[in-house]
Image: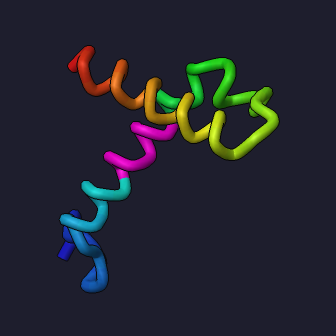
Amino acid sequence: MEGEPPPSFDCQASKQRTTVERCINRLKNWRGLATRFDKTATVFQAGLRIASIFIWSAR
């Protein structure tokens, strides 16, 4: 049984978790999002959407 994952390991969930973590790390590269300079939630959400569009289009 060497080298086998534990019985409760879910490969699909692990892949999804990794994808989300990588996305969050890419968003943290945007200074305005990482430091939260925006005063209102609406402006912050708009910045988040713009950053997401740029990251998605760079794929």
Q: Is residue 23 above or below residue 56?
A: below
Q: Is residue 13 above or below residue 26?
A: below
Which residue is painted at 22% across and 64% down in the image?
Answer: 3
Q: In this view, does 47 lie above or below 22?
A: above
- Residue 54's spot in the image, x, y percent? 36, 19
Q: Is residue 26 above or below residue 18?
A: above
Q: Quadrant of residue 28?
A: top right
- Residue 15's spot in the image, x, y percent? 25, 55
The answer to if 33 sits in the magenta stretch is: no
Which residue is painted at 49% across and 40% down in the image?
Answer: 24
Is residue 43 rendered to the left or right of residue 49? Answer: right
Q: Quadrant of residue 36?
A: top right
Which residue is painted at 65% across and 34% down in the image?
Answer: 43
The residue segment tinted magenta is: 18-24
Q: How is the image coloured?
A: rainbow
The N terminus sits in image quarter: bottom left
Q: Which of 5 and 49 is in front in this view?
A: 49
How many numbered callouts?
A: 0
* Residue lying furthest top: 58
Is residue 43 rendered to the left or right of residue 38? Answer: left
Main SS of residues in magenta: helix
Which residue is painted at 57% across and 41% down in the image?
Answer: 45
The answer to if 22 sits in the magenta stretch is: yes
The C terminus sits in image quarter: top left
- Residue 48's spot in the image, x, y percent? 52, 34
- Residue 41's spot in the image, x, y percent? 69, 46
Is residue 4 rendered to the left or right of residue 32? Answer: left
Q: Which of 2 and 57 is in front in this view?
A: 57
Q: Which of 1 and 29 is in front in this view?
A: 29
